[in-house]
Image: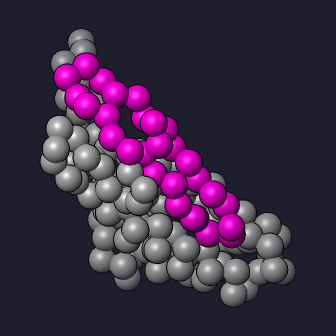
Amino acid sequence: MLLFEGQVPAGMTVIAQTWPSAGRSGSVGGGPSHRWEGKHQEVRVLVAFSVAPSGSDSSGGVAKAVAEAVRVVRESGLPNETNAMFTLIEGEWDEVMAVVKKATEAVQASAPRVSLVLKADIRPGYTGQLKAKVDRVEEHLSDTP
């Protein structure tokens, strides 16, 4: 069943599918929402993305352009973190995708060609997963001798 369909930066179309689990009635959403046993929930997403110019600057680096994208994410006010490979951002589908688009446009301002890699965890009804997912792994690690 189709959960959502939407546009992401650079004209890519993303379509995600979900299958009903035991005890849940599946739903079809034409936009960023989900219906579960008669309840309506906004689609929450945790997105890991990397955006960079396809070429480098005169020093051979992409850090300046990437910094502009990270600045957009941090100014969004949404929960986020950046590591050596990706920037993670969490929130409602439309909010997060708007920030990813704006971050991509910030890189496009300094480069004629841009590369965008995006991975999303779509889990309606859950918040705080940026930290909670790591905490669950750490809990298992602390239980292991």
The quarter of the rendered structure image containing the C terminus is top left
Answer above or below: position of 23 versus 78.
Answer: above
Q: Give the residue at the far top of this rendering.
A: 145
Q: Nearer the viewer, residue 31 or 72?
A: 31
| Side (left or right) of 48 relative to 74 | right
> Percent position (x, y) of residue 73?
43, 74
Answer above or below: position of 69 versus 145.
Answer: below
Task: Identify the residue shown where x is 67% and y is 61%.
Answer: 12
> Percent position (x, y) of residue 90?
34, 59
Q: Over which residues does the magenta segment extend?
A: 1-28
Q: Quadrant of residue 13?
A: bottom right
> Percent position (x, y) of residue 39?
15, 48
| Side (left or right) of 118 relative to 114 | left
Q: Is residue 75 visible?
A: yes
Task: Identify the residue shown where x is 42% and y is 56%.
Answer: 30
Residue 70 lies in magenta, yes or no? no
Residue 14 lies in magenta, yes or no? yes
Task: Identify the residue shown where x is 25% and y is 46%.
Answer: 35
> Percent position (x, y) of residue 121?
41, 45
Task: Identify the residue shown where x is 28% and y is 40%.
Answer: 133
Q: Quadrant of residue 66?
A: bottom right
| Side (left or right) of 82 relative to 33 | right
| Side (left or right) of 130 relative to 96 | left
Q: Nearer the viewer, residue 111 or 91?
A: 91
Q: Quadrant of residue 105?
A: bottom right
